[in-house]
Amino acid sequence: MTTPANYRQGSTWLQTIPVEFNRTLSGAERADERISEVEELKILHPGVWEISYNARSYTGGSGVLVRTALFKNGQLIPGTEALTGGNAIMQTTAGQTILEKFDVNDVIMLHAYRIGTGSASVLSNGDGRTGVMAHWVSPGF
């Protein structure tokens, strides 16, 4: 299939800028918090985009987990959830990659929540340990 010429205008790759932060997940257990330190991505072309993210998390005790996920226009994108943590104090990086259909100006945002009663956070170094990427694939299916 040939991509129509009008879809070739502008960038077909989007990604957040690497930032350094440590966001404590202090909300209620299993209550999604937008990770506002990671900028939102605004979709430039309608169609199917390959979206992915990586999120570095910290869990500070036994049985504490961090669930991260991508949201589109404030709603969970099913299949983007990733779970880290366990029975130790640890830092791990997890994420997902999926195909999703978007309209122009749809917004992708990173969210996370804590499971358990210990400390948990999402963090990043300036080297981009936490970020969101999108690649335009086709005008639709």
Image: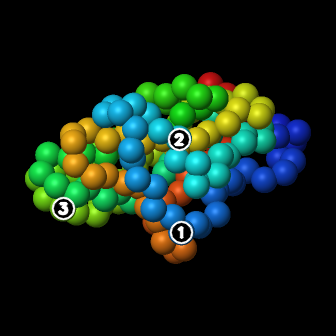
Q: Residues within 10 Å of mark 3 (few under 14, many from 20)?
A: some
Left or right of 54? Residue 42 is right
Q: What amino acid does circle 2 point to?
A: Arg
**SS category of the residue bearing label 1:** loop
In percent of the image, x 40 and y 38: which residue is there?
27
The picture places residue 15, in percent across and down from the top left corner, at: 64, 56
The picture places residue 58, in percent across and down from the top left corner, at: 31, 59
Q: What amino acid does circle 1 point to?
A: Glu
Q: What's the CA distance linking mark 2 and mark 3?
A: 23 Å
Tag 2 residue: 34
Q: What's the CA distance linking mark 3 and mark 1?
A: 21 Å
Tag 3 residue: 89
Is mark 1 in CB contact (under 8 Å) with mark 2? no
Residue 22 showing in the rendered view:
yes
Task: Using the image as rendered, state which of residue 124 and residue 119 is in the foreground.
Answer: 119
**SS category of the residue bearing label 2:** strand
Q: N-terminal of the two: label 3 or label 1? A: 1
The picture places residue 30, in percent across and down from the top left corner, at: 33, 32
Tag 1 residue: 20
Q: Residue furthest bottom?
A: 127
Q: What amino acid does circle 3 point to?
A: Ile
Q: Quadrant of the C terminus?
A: top right
Q: N-terminal of the two: label 2 or label 3? A: 2
> How many dots with numbers?
3
Left or right of 86? Residue 45 is right
- Residue 103 vs 99, above or below: the answer is above
